[in-house]
Amino acid sequence: MLKLSIKDQFGNVKMGINDYEEENHLLESVGERMCYIASQDFVYEEEDVIEVFVEQKNRFLMVKLDESIDSTIVFIPDHSWKYKISKENTSFEAMPDHRFTNKRHYLAVRYATNEEITRYQNWALNPHDQKDFSGAYPHASANVETRNDATFFACNAINGIYANNSHGSYPYQSWGINRQSDATLTIDFGRPIEVDKVSITIRADFPHDSYWTEVTVVFSDESSETFSLQKTKEPQFFSFEKRTVTNVRLTNLIKAKDESPFPALTEFEVYGVNQL
């Protein structure tokens, strides 16, 4: 069983209305394998919550919580995932203008198929990730994010957007390290994955940006791999011996000896297979 709800900050299910209806209806849906919410007249408010409830723990879901967010496989270790709506200025700067602002909405959740769960892919990808962990993996976090500004949050590095020839607001959001030499990005998967490849896309707004000439990926088993990077806007792929991990850290970021103090990361990918 699956349940999808839109609630206010106090846990009350909100109401919406459709064009040919005279009465409001609850924005909540229940299904055995999939459910959706559709409304033609509903406006989100600050701290509204989209809540996904699953009857069993440790489930993979295919989710789409807004028309502007790509459908994504996420892993839910517990019974619920609560996606909080934020209308702070920097939050909106990191997303398309119409995300969570229109009156017409479509949200959908379903259980992922076995084929989707077992395929080889980038398991760091999660355009639904937010700054704080809300119940769904993968999740990105960091020990520094420039000015605590949403356009530089760690989650920007796993949202699947490769635009890197500028910086700042959408679609050029990135992980910004605030010039901090010990900056570290962590991707938590919430379960074991056998991985054998990563891809790193640096922000390439040259000459405003600098870049890293060398980075180290540290795995949850404390093994590590060090890679040399080039000054390029293209994704840079690195393969290595397979290992089973629950998280990876991108650290020991060695900046190029140039005039810019602003290296940044646009996208970080981790390829492998779920270990079920």
Image: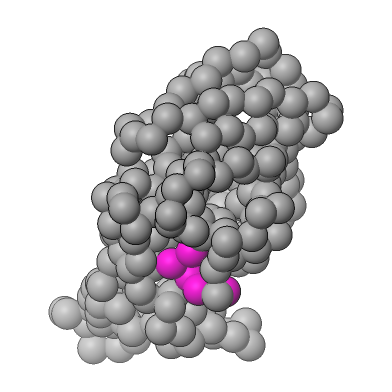
Q: Is residue 263 left or right of residue 139?
A: left
* 270 in the magenta segment: no
Q: Residue at x 56, y 65 (%)?
A: 178
Residue 260 point in image, percent of width and height? 43, 56
Colouring chosen for the image of the structure = one colour
Residue 18 point in image, percent of width and height? 23, 78
Depicted 140 relative to depicted 114: above or below: below
For the C terminus, the image quarter is: top right
Q: Residue at x 62, y 82 (%)?
A: 11
Depicted 24 relative to depicted 183: above or below: below
Q: Residue at x 62, y 43 (%)?
A: 253
Q: Residue furthest right?
A: 222
Q: Is residue 183 left or right of residue 101?
A: right
Residue 139 point in image, percent of width and height? 62, 50
The prevailing secondary structure element of the residues shown in magenta is helix
Q: Residue at x 25, y 72 (%)?
A: 98
Residue 15 found in image quarter: bottom left
Residue 110 point in image, percent of width and height? 47, 45
Closer to the camera in the image, 233 or 87 = 233
What residue range appears in magenta?
Answer: 148-153
From where the camera sits, is residue 234 visible?
A: yes
Q: Is residue 161 left or right of residue 84?
A: left
From where the camera sits, is residue 72 visible?
A: no
Q: Residue furthest left?
A: 20
Q: Is residue 171 left or right of residue 84?
A: left
* 149 in the magenta segment: yes
Depicted 7 relative to depicted 219: above or below: below
